[in-house]
Image (tube, rainbow, N blue to C red):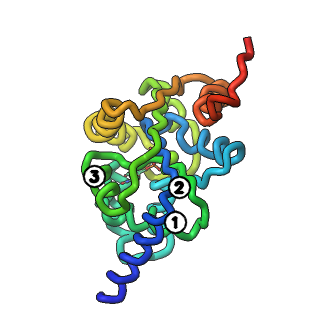
C-alpha cells in the first residue's frame, strides 16, 4: 500500500511539474466528441484521452474494478472519480505529451472538483459540442460500434445524466469564461471548420471572406 501511495504521489508530482495544457471536451452522448478529437489530434498535436475508452479498456484488461465499471456503463451511471482520474493520470504520464484533449470527463461536479484537487490542473478551456437530443439519439442508434450502452433504454438514461449532472459542469466553466461552444448538429466537416478556429492561434487566423 505504502509504495503504491508513494508512486501515486510521485506520478502526480511529475504531472504537476509539467503543467500540461488540458482541454476538456464535453457534450452529450453522440455529440461528436470522439470524432472531432481524432481530427484535432491530426492537426494540432494533442493526445486524445477518452475517459469512456479508458474505462472500456479497463474492463477488457480484466481489472478488479472491471465488473463494477461494466455495470455502471450499462446503466449510464458515472463511475467513481478516483477510478477514472487514476486512468487519466496514468495515460497522461505514459503519453509523454503535454497537450491533452480529455473527452467525456468531468461528467459531474464531483468529477471536476476531484480532478482539480488531485492533479492541480485547471483546463485551458472547455470545448462544448452542443447538439439536439434527437440528432444525438439518431447517431447513437446508427453508429454500430457494438457498445452495450447504445440501446434506446440506456441512451435515455445517459441523456438524463448529461442534463442533470454534466451540464452543471459546463455552466461552472461558462461562468469562468472558459467555454467554447460549437454547434454540433452540422456535418463532421462543417463542425471541424468551427473547431479549427478555436485551436488556431489568433495571429494565424486569416479572414476567408
Ligand atoms: N463514463 C464514466 N465516467 C467518465 C466517462 C465515461 O462513468 O468520465 C461512463 C458512463 O457510464 C458513460 C459511459 O462511460 O455513460 C460512456 O462514456 P463515453 O464518453 O464513452 O460515451 P459518449 O458520451 O461519448 O457516448
Ligand atoms: Mg465518446
Along the line of sight, the residue nearer the viewer: 4 or 177: 177
For image coordinates 61% across by 36% down, the residue present is: 199
Query: Which element type, helix, strand or loop, lies under badge 3?
Result: helix
* Labels in figure, total: 3
* Lower sequence index among marks 1 and 3: 1
Vertical arrangement, residue 152 with respect to residue 118, above or below: above
Q: Quadrant of residue 9?
A: bottom left
Q: Residue at x 49, y 50 (%)?
A: 22
Residue 113: image tag: 3
Disc 2: CA contacts within 10 A as few (<14), some (14-19) or many (>=20):
many
Residue 116 % position (x, y): 33, 55
Whether residue 77 is visible to the viewer of this picture, yes or no, is no
Left or right side of 135 for 169: left
Q: Which residue does the image show at 73% across and 11% down from the upper left? A: 209
Circle 2 is placed at which residue position?
49
Can residue 126 be seen from the camera position used here?
yes
Picture layout, residue 10 above or below residue 120: below
Query: Mark 1 — residue?
Result: 91
Residue 54: give x, y in percent of width and height.
49, 61
Q: Residue pushed farthest top?
A: 209
Identify the residue shown where x is 40% and y is 81%: 7
Q: Earlier in the sequence, mark 2 or mark 1?
A: 2
**Residue contact between numbered discs 2 and 3, judged by CB atoms under 8 Å:** no
In the image, residue 121 lies at what x, y percent? 40, 55
- Tell me: residue 204, above or below residue 112: above
User: As drawn, is 44 to the left or to the right of 81?
Assistant: right
Amino acid at each position: 500500500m505504502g509504495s503504491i501511495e508513494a508512486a501515486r504521489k510521485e506520478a502526480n508530482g511529475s504531472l504537476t511539474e509539467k503543467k500540461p495544457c488540458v482541454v476538456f471536451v464535453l457534450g452529450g452522448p453522440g455529440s461528436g466528441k470522439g470524432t472531432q478529437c481524432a481530427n484535432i489530434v491530426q492537426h494540432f498535436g494533442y493526445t486524445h484521452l477518452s475517459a469512456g475508452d479508458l474505462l472500456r479498456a479497463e474492463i477488457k484488461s480484466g481489472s478488479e474494478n472491471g465488473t463494477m465499471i461494466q455495470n455502471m456503463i450499462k446503466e449510464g451511471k458515472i463511475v467513481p472519480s478516483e477510478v477514472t482520474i487514476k486512468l487519466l493520470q496514468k495515460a497522461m504520464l505514459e503519453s509523454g505529451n503535454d497537450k491533452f484533449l480529455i473527452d467525456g470527463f468531468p461528467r459531474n461536479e464531483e468529477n471536476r472538483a476531484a480532478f482539480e484537487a488531485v492533479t492541480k490542473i485547471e483546463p485551458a478551456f472547455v470545448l462544448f459540442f452542443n447538439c439536439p437530443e434527437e440528432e444525438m439519439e439518431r447517431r447513437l442508434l446508427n453508429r454500430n460500434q457494438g457498445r452495450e450502452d447504445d440501446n434506446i433504454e440506456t441512451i435515455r438514461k445517459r441523456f438524463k445524466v448529461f442534463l442533470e449532472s454534466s451540464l452543471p459542469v459546463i455552466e461552472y466553466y461558462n461562468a469562468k469564461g472558459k467555454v467554447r461552444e460549437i454547434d454540433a448538429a452540422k456535418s463532421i466537416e462543417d463542425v471541424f471548420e468551427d473547431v479549427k478556429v478555436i485551436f488556431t492561434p489568433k495571429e494565424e487566423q486569416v479572414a476567408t471572406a
